[in-house]
Amino acid sequence: MSMRKIISAWLLWVAAVAPVAFSQPAAQMTLSELVSAAENEVQQGSFQTAIPFLEEIVKRAGSFNDKTSLESVQKVRVQLARAYAQMQQWAPAQKYAREYLSQEPCPDRAGGLVVMCQIAFVRQDWLTLKKYAQELYDLPRKKEAEVEQADLFLAQAHYNLEEYDAALQFLPRILQRGGEPDTVAAFKLMLVRCRFETGQVDSILADLQELSKGDAQYDIQLNLSLIRMSDGLFDSGSFRAALALYRMVIPRPELISWQEKKMARLKEKLAGLKEKADDKDDTISGEIEGLERELQVFRAIPEYDLHVASCIAQIYAEQGRPWEAIVMYGQIYQRSPETPQGGAACLEMVRLLTGLGQEKEANDLARSYLDTYRAGLYPRLMTAYLMRRKYDRADFAGVIDLFGYTEKWADPENDDVRTQETQLRYMVCFGWLQQQDYERAAAAFEDVIRFNPASPTAEDSQYWIAMCFLMRQKYQDAHDRFVRFRSEHPDSPFAPEALFRAAVCNFGLENYEKARDLFSQFIESYPDHSLLPEALSMRGDLLGGEGRLDEALADYRRAIDLAGENYAQQPGSSALDQIIRPATYAVSQAAATLELDAAACRDAGEQEIAAEKYRKIIAEAEHYEALFGENADLAQMVYLKSKAQFQLGETDLAVKACLDAINRYGADPFQKGVDSILDKLGSIIKIQLSQEQQNQARDLLLQAREDARSPTLQMRLDVLLADLDGTQDTLGNRLLAGEASLDPVPPPALSLMCSSLLKQNDFSRAQELFDYFAENYEDSPFRAASYQLRGLDLYAQKKLDEAYGLATDALGAYGATEETGWAQLMKGKIELERGEYKQAAETFNAIFSVREWRGAVSAEAMFRMAEAWEAQGDYEKAFAFFQRTYLLYKAYDNGRWAAEGYLRSAQCLFKLKRPSAARNTYRAMLLDEYVRDLPQAEEAKKVLGPAETAELLAGGTNAMEIVELEVGK
Amino acid sequence: MIRRLFIIALWSCLLLGGASQAQDPLRVRIQLTNSKEYLGAVSSRDSESVVFLPYGAEQPVRIPDRQIVYIKLMRPDSSDTKEIDRLFDVGEYRSVAEKLNMLLSPYSDYITLPSNLTHLFLKWLAASYWTGDFDRTLMLATALAGAVAQEDQQTLLFYGGLARFEKGDFQGMAAFLQSPDADTTYPPESAARLYIESRMLQHKENYIQAIRTAALLMVRHSRDADWMPKAELLCAEIYVQLGMPDSANAVLADIDALYSDPDIQKQAAVIAAKNNGDER
């Protein structure tokens, strides 16, 4: 039974309780017989039988005007009204009630009003109901039952007219009186709704607990109201109340099934009643019809279970109950993984699991989703989420790897999906950028433009393509693109940057005047831009280059002061990259300029002026320190100041200043600035000081070492002293033997330990040291040796993919430095082993263009390059590179690569069917003093035989065979 | 016999209002194994028989329990039963337990016999469990074993097992779950089964699986007013054990707002104290 029916039945019952009187056949009876019969029937509750008697009374006595008759007829009218109402015959009920109410005497006005209220209620005419119910309510001297009826009717009227405040005046009273459970539940629901609508959220929860019991919970209207109310609460942020309500909603299939069973029961009951010819069957038929109608409407309502579950899960997540949210989302995903709700649920699960540190489960779930579902928004959102995670961890290869999923996706079905995929493709571009693969990055940006040319991202991509050219040092292309970008997109947020970069390109192209003009244009056009300090510094560099030192210094000082102003607005270590670093550059450049100037003065014999310049360096550094406080690059400042002090002849003061900083911070292994000071101090002492000054400095260091109490500080000073004495290997071995715990070991000492292990080809602690660095000193410049140790360790273990990744990371972290030649070499070697010969040749070839990699690294690179060609069957080229190896690099690595080069050259020549040339190569090898005593020379001796070998080694001959014919072949 | 004696003795101790004191004879109708029914009064009871005075007889007779099929105890007032049913239906277990304690005390000696009050004793059993009175739950489950019909034996197993489990018998429950009866008493995916599984995982310190199982209970049985607060309390407790005090507080705040039952609030307060202690 619906809530309305329940209440309706109750109202009718309540109205019928008021006593009436009735009895038998009418037309032939006397008036008094009629009255008696009617009273008899009414008393027995047989309203239907009473009606003919009552109507006959009205018919016969309706025109009487005496007081008694009027009273009697009026009484009969109100009885008729009640009887018809009881039989649910509303038209005659209304007729008699109206007649009664419009005439006098009207002693039972309340009775007439109750019938009018019933009629209005049944017709759902709420305004009329309100009118009659209010009149009933206002009547003086009512019976208790009439008071209750007035409350009931007014509550209904106000509720249905959405006058919730007014309804609330009556509902608590009605509920207090109690009643049948279903009726109470129906009124309780009304009360909850009224409280909800009037914002009394907190008080509804207790009321709802009762509603969740018994059959009342299966009421369709109740459930729909619950959803409406929950949604309202959810939208207004009342999550706790919303949660309570959502939890009460019965799942749609369960609700339908319950109602269908109920209908089956009613139909069974109806059949039973029909057999017994019971007149209650009309009521049950009506109930069945009503239920069918309600169910039909309900079935047409869209599925709500996923919505409810999703809201509950969101509430859990919002409230900080992640595990409950995960399980709830899990249910949604399990139930309909292919729907947007399923996709959203899966994404939320991945996010929550990640937040809880359940990385593996999150990743497996995300991957399984992406492997299965390939259309719509959520695969894109999931991929974007995973990409962002990879970004946060600087796993750029991972970002690129994720892009592989896009190949399996269907074309975007709408603009939202396309926009999302555009963002994702855009992210991948930055993955390539971070990998420093600028060519691929540019191609990826081009792809973004092709994919969604009208998007803002496509516009930005054009800027980034220009940036890729700049990073590849293709200054002209980059410049042209930046200029075009500015002219095509003058309002783009990147337009100022484009001008700045165009200036940088001119700098790269050595168009210094043009570069200076463009920097000036930038400085004037964008006085508030974050790149302004950099622009000033670069213009300073250019002015300095032109000899306009004062102007240069003014630019540097302005850059420093600007950074200082920015820092004052955004203090803290977060400003390090954006604000302080450009200022550090500016002060360093200012110092370098002043140093040059001072040197020139000194050369001109103007010692006083030179000294003034050095003092200005110290002042600039101190000014910088004052601006940036504890976040200043103190090590660099100590370095700049001490260098100036050394030049001023204040060796003692300089070393003491350094030692002061070292003593102050040196006991904390995490104070990386101290290590830089030590490193720079070492360089200054070794390179810039006279022998006497060196000795003086060394004595001060030894004294400091003796005074040092902290093991960390001791180790730091030991590293510096070992550097000055050239005894790093000894110290490295000592540290390896002595340090059980790595905790007090500062990064330079750890680096020394790695170097010692490298020299011994001992990889036993490679992983430990690498991991320790990664965990504790991730961005330390001293970490490089641990990369090499671990890289070679992995390579030795044939874990080629890991080794390759590590080498790539090392190059990414340090660029092309002396310390990373091994990485480039290892990458080439692994490519060679993978059969990627062309790529390997490119990788090796890149080594020769890097000055820092000249020497042993280049020697091996040349040799490996030859191997790459040999592996491809190109023996001519292989021979050429093997030959270059022994011709150019015999002095490196104790002649190892030259010796190998000779042997492999000869082998190539044999393969080229040039045996004489091959033998000549062996001869040349034995004549080459760099290699002839190496073990590799044994092969040459064997081929040439003992006699010729002896003769060659004795220097008796240098004869070579004639090889032109072979070449001709 | 010793077991019955024990039950009756212990039983008396558990009742409020001194159930063991001498009582007036109770009017009863007794149905015996010979299919005969007698009206009369029972005057006393020992561990295995009742002393019965049939109407009209001059001397009482002692009837062994094994001969009694059913005993109808004539209660002076039956008006409370409807209210108890209502309170039971709306989950007001504390009131139910209190009322049943008062109502059933005079009849406690006859708990082991099938009677017209057996269904009320069963309600008391359930109410005892839900109010956390596990000793009484166990006692009732044991005492009712011979009185209830076959279809109610599951109820005894259900609450008896849970009460033992709540008192810390994890091993016993683990063994039971391996038995063929387990799925009948605690069907898989039922609220009780998920609760038990979650608590067992919690006991094994597998907190993540424990909280997931408790959360699953809440998802699958969100309208179960009996199990929901227990599941929420369990979640709060596990969050504390997982070292997630903010989440524990979030659950406790929900419990505070959503469940007015003082027993639940009391348990929540214990967890809150532990959580705040841990936070400190």
Image (cartoon, coloured by chain):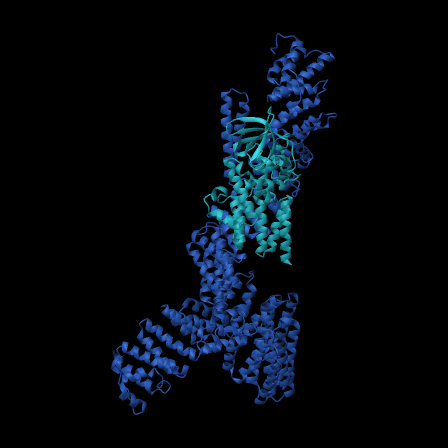
Chain colours: A blue, B cyan
- The C terminus of chain A lies in quadrant: bottom left
Nearest the camera: A41 or B201? B201
- Image position of A64 with respect to A693: above or below: above
At which x and y percent is residue A80?
Answer: 64, 18
Instruction: Please count the marks in the image.
Output: 0
Nearest the camera: A623 or A479? A623
- Image position of B216 with respect to A714: above or below: above
- Residue at horizontal 56 percent and vertical 26 percent from the top: B38
- Residue at horizontal 38 percent and vertical 77 percent from the top: A862
Nearest the camera: A265 or A602? A265
At which x and y percent is residue A870?
Answer: 33, 73
Q: Image quarter for residue A882?
A: bottom left
**Horizontal arrangement in the rendering, residue A72 relative to residue A548 (left or right):** right
* Residue placed furthest toward the front: B59
Nearest the camera: A209 or A577? A209
- The N terminus of chain A lies in quadrant: top right
At which x and y percent is residue B206?
Answer: 52, 55
Is any atom of residue A552 visible in this view? no
Is any atom of residue A907 visible in this view? yes
- Image position of A445 with respect to A39: above or below: below
Q: Image quarter for residue A32?
A: top right
At which x and y percent is residue A949?
Answer: 29, 87
- Image position of A684 with respect to A426: above or below: below
